[in-house]
Image: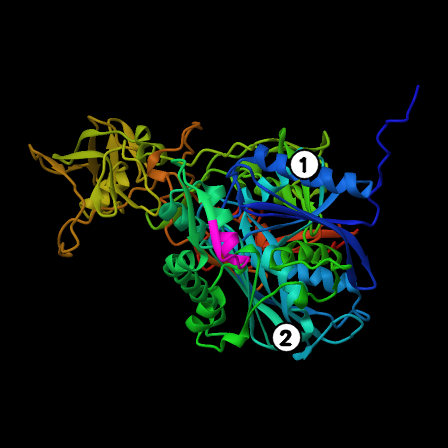
Amino acid sequence: MSTKNAAPELKEQGDLVFALDIGTRTVVGVIGEYIDDKFYLQDYISVPHTKRAMVDGQVEDIKQVAKIVSQVKSKLEEKNGVHLTKVSIAAAGRALKTRQVSMEFDISDREALTEDMVKSMEIETIQKAQAELDATNTGRTIFYCVGHSIISYLLDDYKIISLEGHKGEKATIELVAAFLPNIVVEGLYSVMDLNELEVTSLTLEPIAAMNVIVPPEIRLINIALIDIGAGTSDIAIAKNGSVVAYAMATTAGDEITEEIIRQYLVDFNTAEMIKQSCSNGEKEVEYRDILGNSHKVLAEDIQEMLTPAVETLAETICDAIIEANGSSPSAVFLVGGGSLIEGLTPIVAEKLGIDETRVAIGGGDFLKNVDECGAKLGAEYVTPLGIAVTSMLNQGYDFSVITVNDSKVRVFDTKQLSVYEALTIAGYKSHEIMGRSGRSLTYTLNGVRKTVKGGAMTPAELFVNERPASIMTKVTQGDRIRIVPATSGFNASAKLSDVLGYERFNSGIVKFGGDTFAIGLKATVNGETKEPDYQIQPLDSIETSGIVTFGDLLRVIDAGSEGVEYRVGDNIIDENYVLGAGDEIYAYDSYGNIIGTDIEEPIAVTAPSASAQESEPVQTPVSVSETPTEPESNSAAPSANAIPFNGRGINVEINGEPVTLAPRNGDYILLDLLNSINIDPAVPNSEIVLEINGAPANFSSYISDGDRAVIKVQERTGS
């Protein structure tokens, strides 16, 4: 068969770097090689969206964006004879959240710190930032860390450029981490999946731009870098040698385009053409409006019309800069396609109160550690070049895909996750993973503390790759988790009749020495008389009284038994005799004579009030069973035992560190603190120690505001 017209075989990608900047208006792709700490550009291409598939830097029409990415990929492959399978990408800062944190590490027992050790400490610090963000996140949105910058390293409290190779007693890492909602990240990954591209690095757009415009050696200067795209303006702030803050504004180049649409009655693409013509220095612009009318307009007239919109854009950007920096910076770099808007730089300088010469558009002349290989690239290519450089600096992020009950979950790939962490990311709650014992019911009975235990929970069944697993089992890329959720136990409930056993005591009338008395068990709860069907509430104080034994009766009438014999019929009785309805009790003196007189009306003994005088009859507590009767199990917990929504969350201490748990419905248990720590249960010959306020506990033990908890791994004692 002839192969004369067959397409040439594409070579493998190898070490060639492929970076994509997926913007609101265009998709830019660059390829090149990273040699001796410099990126050498091999080829680049920019393809505009044919439809509005991106809004404010976020993918909204996945298939349409994937189509444009496919065009970029195919053209680069065809021109360069290479099959592209791996890609580096960046995300715009829509709904950006940042956390600045520091963390100390005891390194006294370590040899010289290696690169891996320092990286591990950085990851722990990022996880602390993630935990702080999660604690304040009251919604169900999951946030991914998409970038971080080291603010400072400290060795034994002294600032140091790098920890690697050093020894000491204590290392401290301070950093700022940037987070985006999962919907932003997942949209980008879905586009890559449709193009069979493996994402090897994900970063934040201003981080990427900063790495090629403001490298570490000039970060002593207080510089603000603004990546102005079509949908968002992303900001990074550098000073004192570090990147110290990130921010964003949803005002960007599209605001200018939309103003042109309104003023000149044109479609979006025509408005973009008009805007670019003004930026390119053209004197006059020709266009056709949506009604078919042709127009010619001077560029200076267009610029004058756009001045209010440009001022609004500049003001929004400058407000975000000042909020992130605390004041106006010393200098500003504008990058991205939106930075080319005519008249923007002087207005930014004016709004910030700095000299116009200190606001620059960062194009190819400002690129650091990049060789354009003859190409003269403008500001719109800074971010894609920065994405490529960032991936080679190992400052991007990887995510692993783990399947949970047939649903794919993308997880931050900076460490090997536990099953518990993966399930939490997948949206499972702690009670579904571990289950909860039913809430116990605690009350006091005649001054003695009593507890009715809740029902036992049924633990979850966990499998990793169809093998039985535990919550601490480690999982990684491609693993499959299957969970049969746990079933929580019922909350304890009890009525007075359940714990007092009214059926064991008689009621009615007895006669004694001619007097008539009402007998029977009585109960008060928190000082109020209650019926046997009263539902006991947590911390109720129950007191019993009444006449149920002959001893109770003797105490009511203040009579003794010495030298006196008491009988019911022919039977001699003592103080322990349980009185029955209709009993007639007679007292005999030592000569066998009956003692007593008749009273027609029964005497009902009631509980004395708090103000009762000592001379009044005293109600004597009745002795009831020391072990309360536990009620029969039922599957539904009564509403009286439901825990209301806690609008403040709780503050606890875990392993000596303060942690705030977000508000929610329901109880908190020790398991909820697992994401706030970093332990390795796989250490040989070790065991997990669980404590609450110094007492042994388990993962399903309840925790409350102010509790001190411990979850740690220690060497197993004994054989």
In this view, the residue in front, 39 or 379, is: 379
In this view, the residue in front, 76 or 425, is: 76
Residue 557: where, in percent of width, then height? 17, 45
Left or right? Give the position of 522 relative to 311: left
Amino acid type at image mark 2:
Gly
Residue 241, numbered circle:
2
On screen, residue 579 above or below 399: above
Residue 243: where, in percent of width, then height? 60, 68
**Mark in front: 2 vs 1:** 1
Left or right? Give the position of 467 relative to 442: right
The residue lying furthest to the left in this view is 600
Which residue is the site of mark 1? 70
On screen, residue 407 above or below 296: above
Number of labelled discs?
Answer: 2
Magenta residues?
Answer: 275-285
- Secondary structure state at the residue bearing disc 2: loop
- Residue 422 falls in which quadrant of the image? top right
Residue 521, numbered circle:
none
Q: Residue at x 6, y 32 (%)?
A: 600
